């Protein structure tokens, strides 16, 4: 039997359509999977110089995360309660860093709860949401992670685990995964020191971009000229921020840790 002419025409049209349609379908999922590098600018210990750093971030449309010790708020050289309120009002995140900046590993769980839950309670009583925590000295063990979780934190940041920019041969990852592999153990690439150059800071972001994105927590302490090992000069921070703002065109953005992790904190435990 002969194939009717109209059917043969339809078949020919179909074979023409199929190869044309295929590339369009293949392109669609690629677009949705655009890798993104999220930089979290974090400031530990509630140093008074960080108030100016916060203003610098704001001038670039950025918001940071300030990990403060509730036990030292308002002491000499530290941010005051009203300064922290102003930071939160401006959109910065206020996170916990223990009451007294103690090493949590090795502490008994009860003492860990005092330092982690007690700190969060004090900050919450000042009107802050307090979603994330940073382990003082990055000193953490399984108990401390469990306690941070029980105290209602959505996530907690350590200090190490990511590749230091100065270590070319290290095989550790350049960025934390998003969502983080372990929300109560967000890794960092060490603290920014007075010996850290702007080139190092940029390289850390570039390495993450090259590795396909992820979370890059940058850990600052004192923001002031010639103020010890854990300080960065304001001019160097500004130079980094100017550069970082331009990376937006590459899909690299600055977020607070709570925004980056995207998890909601829980209530404080009843005691
Ligand atoms: Zn600290």
Image: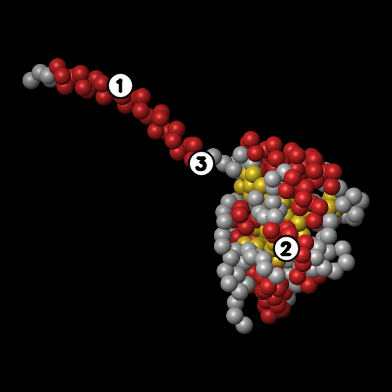
The foreground one among 61 and 7 is: 61
With 32 as the anchor, is 186 left or right in this view?
right
Query: Whole-percent x and y of residue 225?
Result: 90, 50
Give above or below for 193 relative to 105. above
Query: Whole-percent x and y of residue 261?
Result: 59, 56
The foreground one among 235 and 179 is: 235
Q: Which residue is mark 1?
A: 16
Q: Residue at x 80, y 46 (%)?
A: 237
Q: Which residue is mark 2?
A: 85
Q: Describe the element under mark 1 as helix, strand or loop.
A: helix
Q: Which residue is mark 3?
A: 33
Q: Is residue 28 visible?
A: yes
Q: Going from the N terminus, do you reach mark 2 or mark 3 first? A: 3
Packing grade of label 2 (10 A; few <14, some 14-19, many >=20) is some
Query: Whole-percent x and y of residue 151?
Result: 62, 72
Q: Residue at x 12, y 20 (%)?
A: 3
Q: Quadrant of residue 95?
A: bottom right
């Amino acid at each position: 039997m002969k194939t009717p002419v109209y059917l043969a025409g339809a078949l020919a049209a179909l074979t023409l359509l199929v190869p044309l349609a295929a590339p369009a379908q293949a392109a669609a999922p690629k677009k949705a999977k655009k890798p993104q590098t999220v930089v979290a600018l974090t400031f530990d210990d509630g140093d008074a110089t960080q108030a100016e750093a916060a203003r610098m971030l704001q001038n670039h449309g950025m918001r940071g995360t300030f990990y403060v010790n509730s036990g030292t708020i308002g002491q000499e050289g530290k941010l005051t309660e009203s300064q922290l309120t102003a930071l939160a009002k401006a959109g910065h995140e206020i996170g916990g860093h223990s009451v007294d900046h103690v090493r949590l590993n090795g502490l008994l769980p009860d003492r860990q709860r005092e330092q982690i839950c007690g700190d969060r309670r004090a900050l919450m009583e000042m009107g802050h949401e307090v979603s994330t925590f940073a382990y003082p000295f990055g000193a953490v063990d399984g108990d401390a992670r469990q306690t941070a979780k029980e105290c209602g934190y959505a996530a907690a940041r350590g200090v190490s685990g990511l590749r230091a920019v100065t270590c070319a041969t290290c095989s550790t990852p350049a960025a934390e995964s998003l969502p983080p592999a372990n929300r109560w153990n967000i890794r960092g690439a060490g603290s920014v020191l007075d010996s850290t150059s702007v080139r190092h800071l940029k390289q850390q972001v570039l390495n993450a971009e090259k590795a396909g994105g992820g979370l890059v927590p940058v850990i600052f302490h004192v923001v002031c000229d010639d103020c010890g090992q854990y300080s960065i000069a304001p001019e160097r921070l500004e130079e980094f921020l100017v550069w970082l703002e331009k990376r937006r065109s590459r899909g690299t953005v600055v977020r607070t840790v709570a925004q980056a992790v995207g998890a909601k904190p829980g209530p404080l435990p009843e005691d």
